[in-house]
Image (tube, rainbow, N blue to C red):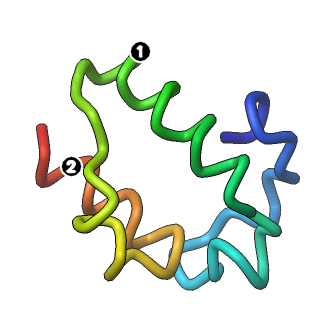
């Protein structure tokens, strides 16, 4: 996320809000879908991401899918 979305490393912490703290917008979400598919080999389903609000939520989502 640091390189692909150009997010400052010090901003990435478990409680960081994806939209408000990290500035992730709808175009970034498209990039995230592509990145996750490329790295982890599965597609993110939009309905599953509705409960993902923080960076920690996102990391937990990825771990649970693996």
Residue 18 rendering spot, x and y as whole percentages:
63, 72
SS category of the residue bearing label 1: helix
Left or right of 39? Residue 10 is: right
Q: Which residue is mark 1?
A: 38
- Residue drawn at the location 46% of the way across and 37% of the way down: 33
- Residue drawn at the location 13% of the way across and 45% of the way down: 65
Q: Is residue 59 above or below residue 33?
A: below
Quadrant in the picture for the N terminus: top right
Quadrant in the picture for the C terminus: top left
Residue 51 rendering spot, x and y as whole percentages:
32, 82
Front residue of 34 and 13:
34
Q: Is residue 5 above or below residue 52?
A: above
- Residue drawn at the location 78% of the way across and 80% of the way down: 21
Residue 26 rendering spot, x and y as whole percentages:
68, 58
Left or right of 50? Residue 23 is: right
Q: Earlier in the sequence, mark 1 or mark 2?
A: 1
Residue 25 rendering spot, x and y as whole percentages:
74, 63
Left or right of 30? Residue 58 is: left
Whole-angstrom CA distance, mark 1 to mark 2, is: 15 Å
Q: In the rendered structure, find residue 52 and report the number of the disc placed on it.
A: none
Q: Quadrant of residue 43?
A: top left
Count residues near mark 1 (Cα–Cα under 10 Å), then give few for <14, some for 14-19, many for 20+: few
């Amino acid at each position: 996320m640091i390189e692909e979305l150009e997010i400052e490393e010090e901003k990435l912490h478990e409680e960081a809000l994806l939209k408000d703290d990290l500035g992730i917008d709808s175009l970034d979400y498209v990039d995230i879908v592509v990145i996750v598919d490329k790295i982890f080999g599965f597609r993110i389903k939009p309905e599953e991401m509705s409960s993902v609000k923080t960076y920690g939520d996102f990391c937990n989502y990825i771990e649970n899918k693996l």
